[in-house]
Amino acid sequence: MAYVGLSDFHAAVYDPALKTYSTPVKLSPAVSANITPNFESVTMYGDDRAVYIEEALGAIEFEFAVTDLKTAEYELLLGKTKNADGVLIDSVDDQAPFVAIMFRMKLAGGGYKYYCYYQGKFQTPGTEAATKGESIEFAPETLTGSFVAREDGKWRAHLNSNDEGAEATAATWFTAGPYEATPQV
């Protein structure tokens, strides 16, 4: 089924030591997402032919754009804080937390495909702007990051809302999260 939409980015902070997630927070409206799992595949040869193939998951490149990266989202996703005057100050000592990212994509025939990437960190975005000319061009806020598998080996969950019995899970995807009974804090 072809995708015809993208919506409902949510983030939940993940604590790998406690294996817990915070309650998911809805982010600004989604513009685009590009997620690339990097697998390395190695083939062993014997008797003049391929006899084994072994595969390993590397980092998962994650890029998403939203209409506007709000201050609270910047703090949540990047581990930044405001000073006493309410000004965000970026520091070399800032540590982005591990987060899970959830979203859904609308299917052409109806329904949604839901995704959750379990553990990753985002980098502080650069600044790019252009003056307004004869035509208006929007410049969404884009974040890039790297995701990895959790200690238990799991790295992603996905659900098609059209599958039999999927309604209950889809209904709680953004509130309870598809964490496989991992408690939330």
Image (spheres, helix red, strand yellow):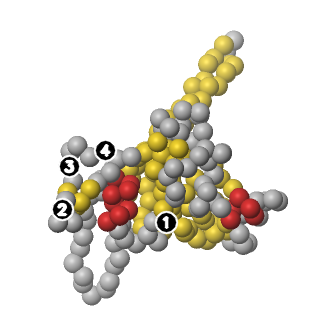
Give the crowd class for mark 1: few <14, some 14-19, many >=20 residues within 10 Å: some
Give the crowd class for mark 2: few <14, some 14-19, many >=20 residues within 10 Å: few
C-alpha separation, residue under disc 3 versus residue under disc 2: 15 Å
Taking the spot 67% from the left edge, 21% from the top edge, the residue there is 52
Between disc 4 and disc 1, whose residue precedes? 1
Nearest the viewer among 164 and 84 is 84
Q: Name the residue under label 2.
A: 84
Placement of 16 over or under 103, stated as above or below: above
Give the crowd class for mark 4: few <14, some 14-19, many >=20 residues within 10 Å: some
C-alpha separation, residue under disc 4 versus residue under disc 1: 21 Å
Q: Mark 1 points at which residue?
A: 26
- Total labels: the figure holds 4
C-alpha separation, residue under disc 3 versus residue under disc 4: 9 Å
Question: Considering the numbered disc 2 on the image, is that residue within a helix, a strand or a loop?
Answer: loop
Q: Which label belongs to residue 91?
A: 3
Q: In this view, does 171 lie to the left or right of 185?
A: right
Whether pointer 4 and pointer 1 mark residues with C-beta atoms closer than 8 Å, the reply is no
As shown in the figure, which amino acid type bears the numbered disc 4? Gln
Q: Which label belongs to residue 95?
A: 4
Q: Where is residue 117 in the image (x, y as percent from the top left)?
A: 54, 49
